[in-house]
Image (cartoon, helix red, strand yellow):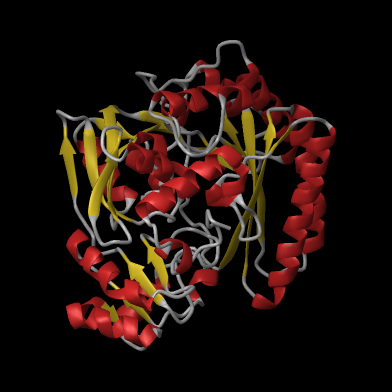
Amino acid sequence: MSVAEAIRAIKAISSDLIAVPGSEEYGNLTNSYFTELEREIKPACFVTPNSTAQVAEVVKAIKPFARPSLLAICGAGQQATRGVANVQGGVTLHLHKLRGLRIDTDKGIVSVAAGEHMGSVYDEVTAAGLGVVGNRHSSGGIGGDAVQGEYNHLIHHRSRGLSYFSYANGFVCDNVANYEIVLASGDVVNANAEANRDLWVALKGGANNFGIVTRFDLRVFPQGQLWGGKVFYFQPSFSGQIGGLVEYLKGPNPDVDVHICLSLGPEKPKALEPFSDIQPQIDQMKTLRVASLKALTDEAYSGAATNRVIKMTTTVKADTEILEFAVDTFRAALDKLKRVGNLLFSITFEPIPVSLIEQSIARGGNSLGLSPSDGPLVVVLLYTSWDKSSDDERIYEVNKEALQIIEAKALETNVYSPYLYMNYAFSHQDPIASYGSESKATLQAVSAKYDPDGFFQTAGVGPWKILE
């Protein structure tokens, strides 16, 4: 069965659904991807449904023509890993026309269509005096975060501001009260704590393995202004930041509200002093202030490079020695990349405190396989952007080598964690396996129940399939 036959089946629904190479719409959709590594992938066409019903029709139409790497699903296209939201020579189902926001104060949720960007969500909830656990940059979508366990960042060893709501509320996926999802059969179902609960839990970390989510119902809560921003540090302060981070995470009573920013005035919460007061700082670049959720997410990734971008990750226990070792390893890796043109290479430490894992359990559980006894943990992110494809293999190998060195040291010192955060994983890594054999077996059982023919395992693209 050919891709051409699948496209003809879609055109039979409506030719308006198809954007072909050479058209303005095709070019605009291609250029909307965050990284050049996704933009250089050329699908046979983009399909742009404007409703859940049309998504269901498209799935029914193409299912008879299922073959490996037929279908990619794209929400906002902001993930860095190549091939997670686009497919060479196949059909890319782009959800950008699925729009709509609605707050239900009685239920305490905001319903978000899969094509929305988080900036619009923040505008809506802020105007109502509410907050929502979403991603950290307003230009991002919701899909990748709400089915992959996104959380809010705390500290970057070079520069970063302060996190938002995760320590007291769990991952983004833990705050999805309901998913509206199109299954491989074309049926539209809701997955929540009461209906299709097994699918609801599987979606919280299981990525695009079960269907196409067309709407997310996210929990909201009262929220006013926040205190936050960015602080840029000189290198002598790195050790102080690491020490402050580990001390906070291992403290007897960590302030889980500090990242919700419950301060009623412009003064900084006391628990943030180890980060905001460390010297030396670059005062001219400091942006700490009282601001809205939208303003802080507008700032978070403003000016981020959009050339060739990769992320790779590992996870360790909260330990000063291994984090300082990771910084040394990063510096050695940087020396190997200094001749790469227009290079941005950074390391980030993002904490997973025990309180976050506890909230995941309290809110119905997820698929990530984490237990409070595992924490506190720190996710280590290596982020690289550059210009030339001729540097690709060099970039990949240096990053892989650095992670291998960090992981070997973590294993040697008994501070290694197998957990891999999917949004930061590269294609050679296996976050699904990192959840543990029990979680993976559960995900496989859910897939067999809701997609018995394995359509999304066979036809759907993406590096992290649960049946592999």
The outermost residue toward the top is 252
Residue 303, image x, y percentages:
49, 57
Q: In screen coordinates, is 126 left or right of 411?
A: left
**Above-or-below relation of 313 to 48:** above
Residue 426 lies in quadrant: bottom right
Q: Using the rendered view, name the quadrant where residue 48 is placed.
A: bottom left
Quadrant housing the C terminus:
bottom right
Where residue 82 appears, x then y in whole percent?
A: 55, 66
Question: What's the residue at 18%, 77% (across, down)?
Answer: 13
User: In the rendered image of this protein, does residue 449 appear above or below residue 59?
Assistant: above
Reply above or below: 49 against 435: below
Residue located 48% across and 39% down the image: 367
Name the foreground residue: 219 vs 208: 208
Q: Is residue 36 left or right of residue 7?
A: right
Residue lying furthest right in this view? 412
* Residue 291 location (% of width, % of height): 36, 34
